[in-house]
Image (tube, rainbow, N blue to C red):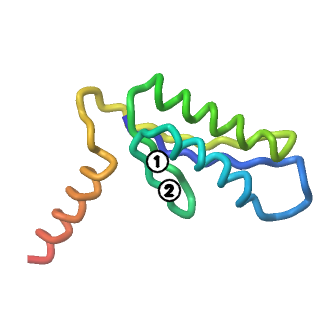
Amino acid sequence: MLVAFSVSPSGGDSSDSVHDAVAAAVRVVRDSGLPNRTDSMFTTIEGEWDEVFEVVKKATDAVGAFGTRVALVLKADIRPGHTGELDGKVERLEQALGDAGS
């Protein structure tokens, strides 16, 4: 499965920037060893249900240290029996875009 999530603190420091909290969450994801990718809005992680959600929980807990509340946005693509989709979906899209230009 693929899980794209965004987690951020609120209710703490008056600063508008949350990069330190997001860095703590991304560190948890990267330390997990699961395939992952971070962009400007979401971190996507690939693995089995229990291992992915354990990482999401730990990342959420890490962000919780930066405020009194945590906001979590999550989207999941649950496709049993498929792996390598973190890259595979993008490769198929790029191929389709290339085919359409021919």
- Report the amino acid beneath label 2: Thr
Q: Residue furthest bottom?
A: 102
Give the left or right position of residue 39, taking residue 8 as reference: left
Is there CB contact under 8 Å for labels 1 and 2? yes
Crowd class of label 1 (few under 14; some 14 to 19; many from 20; radius 10 Å): many
Residue 22 horizontal/vertical position (percent)? 67, 53
Residue 98 horizontal/vertical position (percent)? 16, 71
* Residue at (86, 63) in percent of width and height: 15
Picture layout, residue 58 above or below residue 90: above
Q: Which mark is residue 14?
A: none
Residue 90 horizontal/vertical position (percent)? 28, 57
Q: Which mark is residue 38?
A: 2
Give the left or right position of residue 92, taking residue 43 as reference: left
**Image quadrant where residue 23 sits:** bottom right
Q: Which residue is mark 1?
A: 44
* Residue at (71, 40) in percent of width and height: 62
* Residue at (50, 56) in percent of width and height: 38
Picture layout, residue 6 above or below residue 48: below
Give the spatial CA distance, label 1 vs label 2: 6 Å
Secondary structure under tag 2 reads strand
Going from N to C along the chain, the mark reached first, 1 or 2, is 2
- Report the amino acid beneath label 1: Thr
Q: Residue furthest top?
A: 50
- What quarter of the picture does the N terminus occupy? top left
Picture layout, residue 42 above or below residue 2: below
